Amino acid sequence: MTKKDLTSREDIQRLVETFYGRVRRDDRLGPIFNDVAAVDWDKHIPLLVDFWSTIVFSKPAYKGNPMQVHIDLNKKTPLNGDLFEH
Ligand code: HEM
């Protein structure tokens, strides 16, 4: 899949749902989302769809500070390069 395959918000929605469907079942990433951050997925998925829509379509939908969110999260559990690679 390339950026050209993403033409609508629905495409982003499908991609984000598939990706995070795997993340939440992943042995290493799942517990960070489900236990450490205790993410409410019904709120988190639309937020991420907004985030990626903002980037892919250059249309402002997401307002937030993802860097700060991950800096705070990193204090609770280390988010190292190996985890990003994974
Ligand atoms: C190992 C890598 C990563 C882990 C474990 C991780 C984990 C998380 C978790 C647990 C949250 C929810 C935090 C909370 O609500 O308290 C979050 C939020 C978010 N993450 Fe990540 N993340 C990773 C990498 C990334 C990357 C590479 C991106 C995008 C380039 C990204 C984009 C976002 C965004 C946009 C949010 C929402 C921020 C907000 O609340 O406004 N994350 N992440």
Image (cartoon, grey):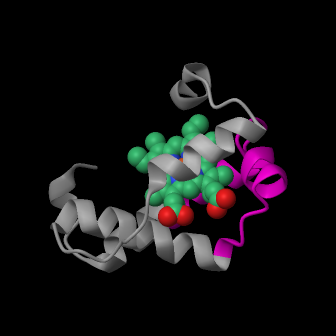
Residue 20, quarter of picture: bottom right
Q: Quadrant of residue 10?
A: bottom left
Q: Give how far across and how far down residue 12 sits, in percent.
A: 36, 68
Relative side of 47 to 22, left or right: left
The range drawn in magenta is 17-41
Place of residue 39 in the rendered image (x, y in percent of width and height, measured from the top left) = 72, 64
Residue at 67 percent of width and 45 percent of height: 73
Q: Answer above or below: position of 10 versus 85.
A: below
Residue 42 inside the magenta-drawn segment: no
Q: Is residue 29 magenta?
A: yes
Give residue 5's position: percent from left, percent from top. Answer: 21, 60
Residue 19 is at least partly visible in this image: no
Q: Which quadrant of the structure image shows residue 52?
A: bottom left
* Above or below, 86 relative to 73: above
Q: Nearer the viewer, residue 25 or 48?
A: 48
Q: Position of residue 21 (x, y in %)?
A: 63, 59
In this image, 63 relative to 32: left or right? left
Front residue of 86/55: it is: 55
Q: Main secondary structure of the magenta part?
A: helix
Question: Which residue: 44% across, 58% down?
Answer: 65
Name the residue at 51% across, 49% down.
68
Q: Residue furthest top?
A: 82
Q: Is residue 52 visible?
A: yes
Residue name at image x 46 percent, y 66 percent: 48
> Compared to 83, does 56 lie above or below?
below
Q: Is residue 70 left or right of residue 37?
A: left
